[in-house]
Image (cartoon, grey):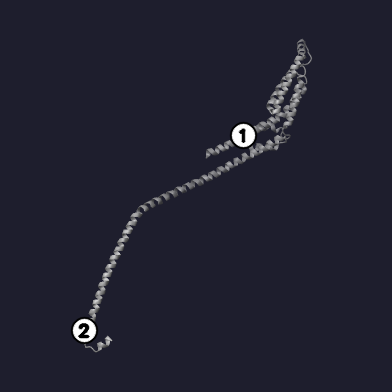
Amino acid sequence: MQYLRCLFLTPEEALSRERVRNEIAREKLSGARLQRAGEEEHYEAEVKHLNDELQAKRDSFAAVARPLLTEYDDVFLAQHYYQEVSNILEGHVRVMSQLADRELEGYGYVGKRLVGAGLHLEALRVRLARGEPFRRELSAALRGASSPDLAVVAAPLMAVGDRGVPPPAALRATGFDLARAVEAAGSGPARGPPRGWLDLLKFRTSLSPTMLEMRQAQARRAAAHFLAHVEKGEYRQALDVAETIHAEAMREGVPNAELLDSAFTAFRNTVLPALAADMFLRYSRASLDSARYACVEKMLMEE
């Protein structure tokens, strides 16, 4: 519509109107520029304020975090050292575990050997107690022990290994036979027929009732003393008493000397294997206990 009007205006009027519009537009443009400049200044001021606040917060956070960072550095350093120490300790533990495993393998072998020796010894003890042949068990016990001293102690047992050690009943039976032989030996005079005046005097003295009663009482006491040891199972003491009685009887030339000697020989042949078995069992138990204590002591000292 304005354009159509401009067609009917004079050039001066059209120019004047155009100038007026230009001035109005210039004023609007200047106002817009001023407004934009104001807005930019406000924005810059606000941005600067925000930057200042942000910087202040950063400084505040840095001031607060600086001790934490220092502590973190200390913790990190400590963690590093801890890790190093942990690695060293793990290495030591690994080495010690390997050494311990090797030691335990060695001690396990020793322990198995000691257990095996104990089992062989127990099997031998059972055989000896039953009076059964024990040569195989004795050989196994000697192999398990691997002790030259024990082999020396076991030498007397080897002679009776195929027939066994006489049981306690046989020991008591031969003991009773020997006691009866001792009493029988004390029932007569001490010597044979006289061959001279001195022998005649001794023979007549030995035939007196008083001397006979004394000899019988002495023989009964000796037999009772001997049987007391036999009944208690004190065969070592019983053998000592029997040897003393036998030696005195053989020296004095008592009657029934052959019977006494035969009974004494039977008792000695019966009791000696039992004494050898008892000695071997005692020595082997002491040896086994000593080996066990030595093994435990060595383990404790190495720990």
Query: Foreground residue, 20 or 175?
Result: 20
Q: Quadrant of residue 115?
A: top right
Question: Is residue 1 shown left or right of residue 125?
Answer: left
In the rendering, at what x and y percent does residue 148 appear?
63, 34
Count of numbered marks: 2
Please name the amino acid that badge 2 sits on.
Answer: Ser
Q: Quadrant of the N terminus?
A: bottom left
Secondary structure state at the residue bearing disc 1: helix
In the rendering, at what x and y percent does residue 69 appear?
37, 53
Residue at the extreme top: 197
Secondary structure state at the residue bearing disc 2: helix
| Numbered circle sitting on residue 128 | none
Asked whether the beta carbons under mark 2 and mark 1 sit within 8 Å of each other, the answer is no
Query: Foreground residue, 44 or 109?
Result: 44
Give the residue at x 68% y 27%: 236
Please name the amino acid that badge 1 sits on.
Answer: Ser
Decide: is 180 above or below 63: above
In the rendering, at what x and y percent does residue 254 appear?
76, 19
Label 1: few (<14), some (14–19) or many (≥20) C-alpha neighbours in 10 Å: some
Task: Tell me the residue that label 2 is attached to.
Answer: 16
In the rendering, at what x and y percent does residue 147 appear?
63, 35
Of labels 2 and 1, earlier in sequence is 2
Task: Tell me the residue that label 1 is attached to.
Answer: 287
Which is more foreground, mark 2 or mark 1?
2
Label 2: few (<14), some (14–19) or many (≥20) C-alpha neighbours in 10 Å: few
Question: Is residue 25 shown left or right of residue 110?
Answer: left
* Residue 224 visible: yes
Decide: is 12 above or below 109: below
